[in-house]
Image (cartoon, rainbow, N blue to C red):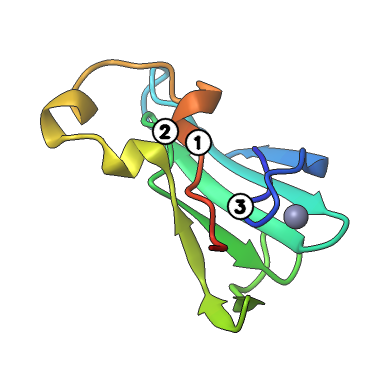
Amino acid sequence: MRCPVCDGALQDVLIRDLGGITADITWQLHAGRCGEHGWFQTEVVSRPPREIFAVTRPFGAARRIVVDGREHFSFSTSWNDLPLQERRQNVDPLEATYWQTKPVSS
Ligand SMILES: [Zn+2]
């Protein structure tokens, strides 16, 4: 996971395995910290995440972050932008390209 604000690699990445009802379901919480922009978190349930959220601490409450005077609460991923048909495919939920968020500035 990368920082949705500056695209920097996140540090102190934590992955909490929440366990699926059946063994073939991947259900994980991922959290990581950007030195400049704080903690981010997302949930993976068999599919790449559609949004990455800013949080106060790993597995903590959501927070707002302000970039260029605009408030952001969550950041949609490239997976979220795919047509529904493509999102029905079986893909590796941890594939980094699906986790890419749009640049927030500009
Ligand atoms: Zn950052």
Q: Label 1 belongs to which residue?
A: 99
Secondary structure state at the residue bearing disc 1: helix
Q: What percent of the width, then of the height, locates residue 37?
A: 77, 63
Amino acid type for the residue under numbered disc 2: Pro
Q: Quadrant of residue 16?
A: top right
Mark 1 and mark 2 in contact? Answer it, CB < 8 Å.
Answer: yes
Secondary structure state at the residue bearing disc 2: loop
> Which one is in front, 90 or 7?
7
- Residue 1 shows up from this direction: yes
Is 79 situated above or below 75? above
Category of crowding for the residue at label 2, using alpha-carbon neighbours closer than 10 angstroms: few (below 14), some (14–19), many (at least 20):
many
Q: Label 2 belongs to which residue?
A: 48
Question: Real-space Cα distance between discs 3 and 1?
Answer: 10 Å
> Which one is in front, 38 or 44?
38
Q: Which residue lies furthest to the left in this view?
A: 85
In the image, which is nearer the foreground, mark 2 or mark 3? Answer: 3
Category of crowding for the residue at label 3, using alpha-carbon neighbours closer than 10 angstroms: few (below 14), some (14–19), many (at least 20):
many
Q: Does the residue labelled 3 lie within 8 Å of ligand 1?
A: yes
Amino acid type for the residue under numbered disc 3: Pro
Category of crowding for the residue at label 1, using alpha-carbon neighbours closer than 10 angstroms: few (below 14), some (14–19), many (at least 20):
many
Image disc number at residue 4: 3
Q: Is mark 1 within 8 Å of ligand 1?
A: no
Which residue appears at 61% of the width and 52% of the height?
4
